[in-house]
Structures are given as structure tokens and as C-alpha cells.
Image: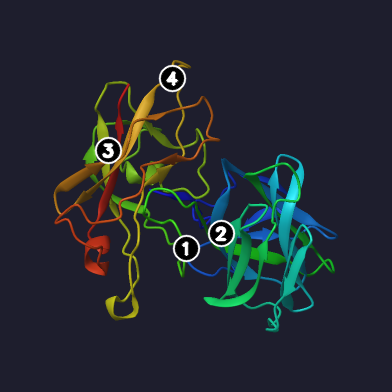
Amino acid sequence: MTRVWTEGFEMQDLVEITHVGGVINTTIKRSGGASLKLYDYQSASFTKSITAVSEFYLRFGLYTHDTVYIYWKKGGTTLGYVKYLSGTLSISSGALSDSGSTILVPDSWYLIEIHVKIDDATGAVDVRLDGVLECNVSGDTKPSADTTVDTLYFIASISAAYTATYLDDMSLNDTAGGADDSWCGEGKIIMLSPNDDVTTELTQYPALTDHHADVDDFPADGDTTYVQGTVVDEEDLYELTASGLVAADVDTINRVWVESRSKDTTSTGGTLLLFINSNGTVDDGPDVTLSTSYTKKILSGEFLQNPDGPAAWSVAALDALRAGVRTRS
């Protein structure tokens, strides 16, 4: 697996992102139910820390009326950036630069992909616009002694109080592992939320009728409604809302994962796992160690195939999918 990061803001929070002047938006989005809105007058930004890599592929949906910079950095040192200004995209990396010629229409969704390779001789920065190469440079992309990138920094210079920049359907690949090691390509991220109970072994707080009603709040409501387990291998399993997808309109379903906001109430490093149940076939994610707050993104890992086969995911299989949580320690 070489997918480093995937984010569609469907959980409607900004966990794992450092942000200034950013909020979740549920009105203007490229797919699913939410996007990230950068809106503070003058400037708004967010920072994403990643495991250091020397080469990566970044994808995001962009909807803007304003100037936007996408920097890649090592610590506080900028190694290069892509800029959207006055309708066009451009690259700056050390002494290298290039500009695209396509004029982007303001306040419209575009898919931007950026490939960066840090090297003092064979480096490269390539930018695709809706899947087509728009601008690129090659050569020395290592303007400092740093050979890797560990920080992505997005900043929008908001032109007026009524304008904003929106980001959605974000993903990042590195080049290791033999899969997901190149361009991310087209991708739209949607959520299937819990809407019925199948197995209810965990304890509800407060004690209501339906367990799924305690875990279907987006953003998560913290300690207001939740389920909790105190015995190893207790689990809840939930039916999910239908995807709303039409099979004839879907090219490929690339990955499925389960995500939660969970915490440890005893400060002892408790663990849980998230899992899927496809037509009775269960596939578990890894054990995940919890923190004592809801500020950690809890993930199952990615299921690239339907375990009931295994086979490529179909819309029918997705719509019949169930998901759950199991206590581990």
C-alpha cells in the first residue's frame, strides 16, 4: 500500500489538519456531503504533516475565485510550490518555473494533480488539470540541502470578504510498494453512514433504542451519544445507507474503508478495530491504539477488493455492505 492520505471531509471535522480560517462546508462540494472551505478575509490556510518522502503524487478538487498556493516543505523550508493566479496554474521549484495556458473559470470545480520528485539532477514537478498535463519542470528541484518533503501547506489569499476557496477529494501517493505508486487519478469520496443495527454487544450512552443512532452524528458529538465496550471482542455491526451510485455511471470503486472518532476512557492504551461484513464475509482492519481524546482519525485500513470473492467492488456489493467496531484490549 502506498496511499499515504485520503480525505474527503465526509466526517465533517478537521482532525489531523492544522488550519487557520478553515471550516467544513456542506453546500459547495465536489462529491459526497462536505468540503473544506478556506474563507478568512486576506488569507486562510491549512497544513498537513506527512511521513517524509522524496517523491509524491497529490490530488485535490479546487473551487476558487482567489489566489491559491500549494507549497511542499521540509520543516520550515519551502522546496517549491504550485500557484493558481488570474485563472492559470504555474510551478516554481528552485530556479525552475513553468506556467500553464488553460484559463480556469472562477468558482468551478477542477481536479488538480501534482507530481513532485526532489533531486538535484533528475527532479521533476508535473501538474495535471482534469487529467491532462498542464505544466512541468525537470532538473534541480532541491533548492536546499533537504532531500525529502514532510509538510504540505495550502494557503488562499482571499480577494474579498464574500469569496472563498473550497477543497475536496484529496489524496496522496508515494512511490513505494508497487500499488498506488503514481498518479492518483480521478476520485470522488462519499460516505455510507450507519442507519440500522445488526449486532449490538456494546453499551449505549445514553441508553436509547438504536445503537446506530449513537454513532451517526457528523461531526461526531463527543460524549453526548456513543457506544462503549469494556470486554475484549465485543462488537457492534451496522447496516449502512445506500451509496446513491448508479452502476452504469461508475467506472471503478478503488477502495473502501471504515472510519471512526473513538477514544480510550482509562488512559491505558486500549485498542479497537474497525471491520466490514460483505455478504457474511468479514474482513478486519488492524488493531488501533486509542488516545484519550477524539482528535485521532481511527481507520480500518483500506479494502481494495470485496472480500466476498475476492473481486472488484461493485455498486451492488457496496450498497449491501455492513461495517462495525470491535473492542480489542
The image position of residue 281, as x and y in percent, is 15, 48
Q: Residues at badges 2 and 1 in contact (C-beta under 8 Å)?
A: yes
Reading the image, the residue beneath label 1 is: 184
State the CA–CA distance, disc 3 to disc 1. Answer: 33 Å
For the residue labelled by badge 3, is the local secondary structure a helix, a strand or a loop?
Answer: strand
- Mark 2 or 4, nearer chain start: 2
Q: Position of residue 119 (x, y in %)?
A: 64, 52
* Sequence order check, earlier mark of 2 and 3: 2
Measured Cα–Cα span from mark 1 to mark 4: 34 Å
**Residue 269, label in figure:** 4
Q: Residue at x 30, y 55 (%)?
A: 304
- Tag in front: 3 or 1: 1
Residue type, label 2: Leu
Disc number for residue 236: 3
Q: Residues within 10 Å of mark 4 (few under 14, many from 20)?
A: some
Q: CA distance from mark 2 to mark 3?
A: 35 Å
In front: label 2 or label 3: 2
Residue 74 visible, this orientation:
yes
Q: Amino acid at mark 3?
A: Asp
Q: What residue is shown with label 2?
A: 58
Q: Amino acid at mark 1?
A: Cys
